[in-house]
Amino acid sequence: MNTTPIKKREMFVFAWGDVFGGGAQALISVLYLIYLVDFIGIDAGLAGAAILISKVWDAVSDPLMGVISDNTRTRFGRRRPYILFGGLLLIASFALLWYPTASWGDLPKVIYAIATYLIYSTVSTIIAVPYSSLSAEITMDIKKRNSVNVLRLVVSTAATAICTLLPSMVLEMYKAGSITLTQFYLIVGFGFGVFFALPLVLIGLITKERVALPVEKSVFEFKTFVEPLKNKTFRGLVKMYLAQSIAMDILGSGIVFYAIYVAKGSSTVFLGTFIGVQLLMFPIIQVLINKIDKKKIYYTLLPLALVSFAGVGMYPSDWPIVGAYALTALTAVGFAGAQLMSWIIFPDTIDVAELKNGTRTTGSYSGIMTFIRKTSSAIAIQIFALMLAFSGYVKATEAIPVPDQPDSALIGIRIAMAGSFVILMTLGYFAGKHFPLTNQLSIRVRHFLKRKEESIIQNWSVEEQAEYQEIATRLF
């Protein structure tokens, strides 16, 4: 095990890698559905289904990748080789998503969309599962681990800003006729592919893994995949993360349609406002992490987000649009804690898992988290695709890039975006309230992990054994 303290350069390189985790997911959430429907001409319902189909494969590949990386033994570590290899594959797989097939027949277009999304999703799995595992293993110092994961998520949010604002600007340029579809493809497909791949290659070359490897390897079988879900604390985190990630992707997917057709404003301003406010909130959250329970940071301001975004959804189209922008800013204030906390809490749940099981199979847990993250995007896109299909949405054409929409489609966009967000984050609020792990308990978990290394439980004091049993009851 590498025991050298983590240095700032390594922290920054590792954090930079989350430009892929935050940026690529945001870009796809914001742009891919409208690209398939308005640019390529695929029916909205089929476009959403094409993306959702890949999640059947992800349900197997993400947990499987976790087991594979847990069982890998190389002189470069368990996680880094996959991040490096995946980064090299990413450029081509991402470019394939955006290849302009508008002139193809309907069936070939749908088949191509399914096939290329499956390829991209597989490459994403090769990268994302080891990367999120490494977030819990790059240092075992709790405060430094908190710091490096906050830094990582700040980078992720900044990448989200870049990868929603710039593509939405490129979209607006295409809609205005300023660029061709081929130019759009080169900018989005290749330009962003290189942007995502470069830091991943550097992580594979520079970072270190600082965790003792288990002597026994895990087995490739179904119970290995579901084992993490037997952990009460991890199940609680899954509920929080699922609610937050789907809500975020629904907001991202819907705001482009909302801005273009409902509010008659700029999706760039909506997204820039939301992400800019979140970035301003992160330094405040960084100060609070070691002072207030992380779960409280997750849920405390969520009621503000719920009310504010409901206001965005109901905001009259003939009112000054600045009001909708202001409500979006308030949504960002309320949502910032939920957006940041899930991955800050993740390493703490791995500590709980190690205390319970005696091994640190981070990859298996990371596989489930990665599956949730990718599935949330597909679910968000499917919700919007079905709503568009059922509400009479009129597809754009080259001759009419911004067609008039019937009232049913405008109402459908409002409901799919704001209604789904409110429901999901209400569920997230209650999941956060009932999450069992506190900051103080996390410190005690680390204490008992160290005690287990020193001696067997039977040799502990009566008080220690009693405390351990109480923690096990609450967290296992």
Image (tube, grey):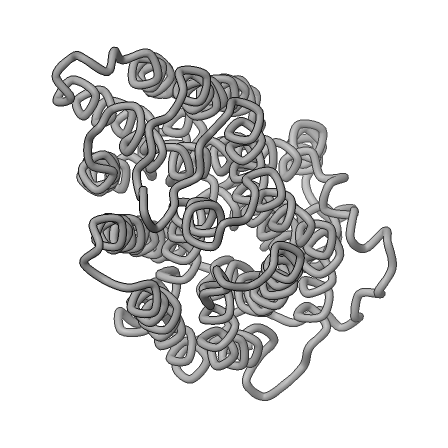
Observer-nearest of 334 and 365: 334
The residue under the point 58% across, 31% down is: 386
Observer-nearest of 475 and 100: 100
Query: In the image, is 331 to the left or to the right of 57?
Result: left
| Residue 445 visible | no
Observer-nearest of 305 and 178: 178
The residue under the point 34% across, 69% down is: 182
The residue under the point 60% across, 50% down is: 51
Query: In the image, is 352 to the left or to the right of 425?
Result: right
Query: In the image, is 230 to the left or to the right of 154?
Result: right
* Residue positioned most to the bottom: 75
| Quadrant where the image shows the N terminus | bottom right
Residue 188 rendering spot, x and y as whole percentages? 34, 64
**Above or below, 70 relative to 273:** below
The residue under the point 65% across, 49% down is: 368
Image quarter for residue 273? top left
Number of labels in the image equals: 0
Image quarter for residue 110? bottom right
Residue 94 rendering spot, x and y as whole percentages? 47, 68
Observer-nearest of 252 and 160: 252
Residue 127 rendering spot, x and y as whole percentages? 54, 68
**Above or below, 192 relative to 132:** below
